[in-house]
Image (cartoon, rainbow, N blue to C red):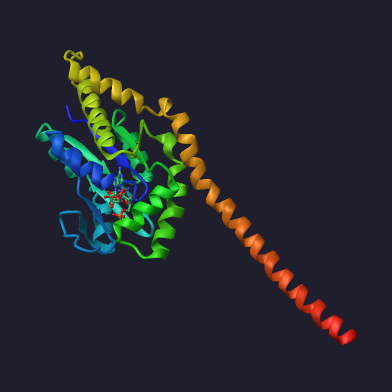
Amino acid sequence: MTTVFIISAPSGSGKSTLVNRVRELVPGLKFSVSYTTRQPRGKEQNGKEYFFVSRKEFEAMIAKGEFLEYADVFGNYYGTAARFLHDAQKNGRDLLLDIDVQGAAQIKAKIRDAASIFILPPDRLQLERRLRDRGLDPDPVIQRRLAAAAREIENYSKYDYILVNDDLKESVKALQAILLAERFKHSAEPATDQTQTQCFEIAERCRRANMEERLQPIIASFVQPAHSELITKVLALFATAAKWLGLMLYFVRHAAS
Ligand code: ADP
Ligand code: 5GP
């Protein structure tokens, strides 16, 4: 039986890094290559990272019912072709989808036992650092990604598992454990050896219900900057007002003398 895994994360959280590592460690995984109407970035190749198509081509695929799910993300269409699921089922492989929160909701509605995983950075500062160190985006784009991250994180409660990508080695281990635990669960065979039991234990720790406490400071770190930005703006306003007041007093005093 094919298990469907949904992975979502704010940009820069380390999703590609984790997925690439885990694909080397977990055999029998098929990665779905999405269709998109956005332009290729950097070294992206058609058919590797995405299938790059025009809006007209994408809309023709929608009309023919070729998508398992699709969504408008940041003004571009993105979609998972249903044939990826059919191929995985035919070849007895599991399917890994890297999609946004809207797509995740559509898949969950269609495939009840799909397992969804939300990857998070340890906090906003680290996310900003990772986006800068990655060196792919100019500053305004980084600011936009951080603002989008704050909104995306609000959707964490729709996912089965939460993975905080702090230490990379630990995160790879946790993601591998989640994939294997879900696979064991669907295979209907009871956990027998120590590796399986260990996978279940690690995966259980990442269950959303067990992550609430760990999540609160992360969510707070994405809220605070908005407050501190407001405080900075108010202070700047006071400073400007004080400067003008000082100037006015100076002129009034000189005019009087
Ligand atoms: P995403 O696919 O979520 O946009 P990437 O996989 O491109 O993110 O990772 C963003 C940057 O963060 C990359 O430079 C990557 O090497 C780095 N990175 C990923 N995971 C970690 C981690 N656990 N600790 C430190 N840096 C990380
Ligand atoms: P990017 O353009 O940075 O590669 O991806 C932007 C967003 O689109 C990411 O959140 C990514 O997960 C999401 N995405 C990629 N492919 C799909 C897809 O097929 N369906 C949906 N719904 N989202 C996708």
- Give the answer, above or below, for where 128 lies relative to 156: below
**Residue at 23% over, 42% down:** 19
Q: Position of residue 169 (x, y in %)?
A: 25, 36
Residue 74, visible in the rendered structure = yes
Q: Which quadrant, please, contains the C terminus?
A: bottom right
Q: Position of residue 234 (x, y in %)?
A: 66, 60
**Residue at 74% over, 75% down:** 244
Q: Position of residue 111 (x, y in %)?
A: 29, 32
Q: Position of residue 84 (x, y in %)?
A: 17, 43
Give left or right: position of 241 versus 158: right
Most extreme residue toward the front, as rendered? 257
- Give the answer, above or below, for where 55 lies relative to 89: below
Q: Residue 52 sits in which quadrant?
A: bottom left
Q: Residue 185 sits in which quadrant?
A: top left
- Give the answer, above or below, for where 66 lies relative to 113: below
Q: Which quadrant, please, contains the N terminus?
A: top left
